[in-house]
Image (cartoon, rainbow, N blue to C red):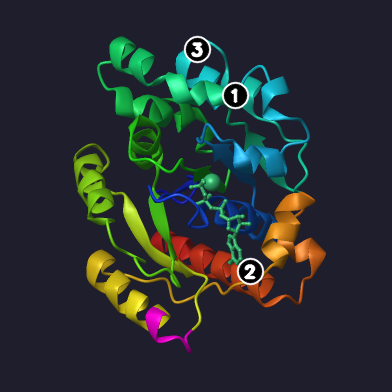
């Protein structure tokens, strides 16, 4: 990776509710606190990260990620909202419109998985981090996110009985994307709801290591404050900076920034 280029990180897992959005928000917040310039792109029609980070409701926003992918003549700046609820974090909103753009992308582009990548290219020299919140699906939106990324990470519900089960499809898709984005780098599986004392969590860590080959050394535990943080739309750090999860997300940001810095070296 060239030193001046942005690190683009897709947070992907087609399983719903495994912590993708929570990770995007708290990772972005902590990277911004470290002085990095950060943009979150919400590629999920549910628009949960937009609901959290944005000052407006996504339905009120004219130019969201959907329009960005459809109207290539509009300048990228039209989509970037620098004024958000999270200091130092800019946002490209997601919206319901993302749900229905798949066919148009397929009909209008010879390489429909690479529209986001082409769109972001002019931005890469001007920002440190782009974090992409993916929808719970492996379809064209996640494929676009992976094709546009330099890195990806996979949040996993560590305490769940089927933790890493069913995720081989994700690896298959990544294999396909690597044909067009060969330098896509895996940061690792990120264990969430993790408790080392529980045998189920230890088993899931073992399964994740087998399936993905790499587990991020920072693990995220469980806290009801996460829901509280989503409800009042502020990053966890601002609710309680001594909360164990707030500290773990800070460590995660430092870990990822260290990995990226090493690649530049
Ligand atoms: N470490 C945690 N401890 C407790 N609750 C958490 C934790 N991480 C996330 N949650 C809660 O779990 C729910 C799902 O999290 P989140 O929305 O981040 O998942 P997601 O993967 O983005 O979901 P989707 O696939 O629907 O986009 C949310 O209510 C969130 O507040
Ligand atoms: Mg989400």
Label whose residue precedes the other's in the sequence (1 or 2): 1
Q: Quadrant of the C terminus?
A: bottom left
- Report x, y in % for residue 195: 51, 81
Q: Nearer the viewer, mark 1 or mark 2?
A: 1
Who's the residue at 53% across and 63% down the image? 257
Seen from the viewer's position, the closer of residues 82 and 230 is 230
Give the CA distance from mark 1 to mark 2.
29 Å
Secondary structure of the residue carrying numbered label 2:
helix
Between residues 220 and 119, which one lies in front from this camera angle?
A: 220
From the viewer's perspective, is residue 150 above or below residue 63? Answer: below
Q: Position of residue 87 (x, y in %)?
A: 77, 49
x%, y% of residue 239?
80, 64
Quarter of the image where one finds residue 83? top right
Indicate the quadrant of ligand 1 in the picture: bottom right
Residue for point 74% across, 65% down: 237
Marks 3 and 2 sit apart, C-alpha to C-alpha, by: 36 Å
Between residue 16 and residue 243, name the one nearer to us. 16
Sort mark 1 into few (<14), some (14-19) or many (20+) by Cα contacts within 10 Å.
many
Identify the residue at horizontal 39%, vertical 52% (top origin). 151
Horizontal relation, residue 29 to residue 126: left or right: right
- From the image, tell me which residue sits under label 3: 71
> On the image, numbered disc 1 is attached to which residue?
64
**What secondary structure is found at the residue carrying circle 3?**
loop
Majority SS type along the magenta span: loop
Q: Tell me whether circle 3 and circle 1 mark residues in contact (CB < 8 Å).
A: no
**Where 110 falls versus 162 (above or below)?**
above
Tag 3–tag 2 contact (CB < 8 Å): no
Q: The magenta stretch spans which residues?
A: 196-200
**Structural crowding at the residue carrying mark 3, measured as other residues with C-alpha within 10 Å and reported as few (<14), some (14–19) or many (≥20):** few
Q: Mark 3 or mark 2: which comes first in sequence? A: 3
Residue, disc 2:
250
């Amino acid at each position: 990776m060239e030193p001046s280029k942005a690190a683009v990180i897709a947070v992907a897992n087609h399983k719903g509710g495994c912590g993708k959005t929570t990770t995007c928000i708290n990772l972005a917040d902590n990277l911004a606190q470290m002085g990095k310039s950060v943009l979150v792109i919400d590629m999920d029609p549910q628009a949960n990260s937009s609901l959290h980070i944005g000052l407006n409701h996504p339905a009120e926003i004219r130019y969201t990620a959907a329009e960005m992918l459809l109207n290539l003549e509009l300048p990228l700046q039209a989509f970037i909202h620098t004024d958000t609820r999270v200091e130092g974090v800019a946002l490209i909103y997601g919206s319901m419109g993302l749900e229905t753009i798949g066919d148009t992308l397929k009909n209008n582009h010879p390489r429909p998985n690479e529209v986001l990548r082409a769109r972001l290219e002019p931005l890469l020299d001007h920002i440190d981090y782009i974090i992409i919140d993916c929808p719970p699906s492996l379809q064209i939106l996640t494929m676009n996110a992976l094709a546009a990324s330099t890195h990806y990470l996979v949040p996993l519900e560590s305490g769940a009985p089927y933790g890493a089960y069913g995720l081989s499809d994700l690896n298959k898709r990544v294999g396909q994307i690597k044909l067009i984005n060969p330098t896509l780098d895996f940061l690792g599986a990120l264990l969430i709801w993790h408790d080392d004392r529980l045998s189920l969590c230890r088993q899931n860590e073992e399964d994740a290591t087998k399936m993905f080959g790499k587990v991020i050394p920072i693990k995220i535990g469980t806290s009801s404050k996460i829901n509280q943080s989503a409800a009042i739309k502020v990053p966890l750090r601002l609710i309680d900076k001594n909360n164990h999860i707030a500290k773990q997300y800070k460590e995660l940001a430092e870990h990822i920034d260290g990995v990226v810095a090493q690649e530049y070296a």
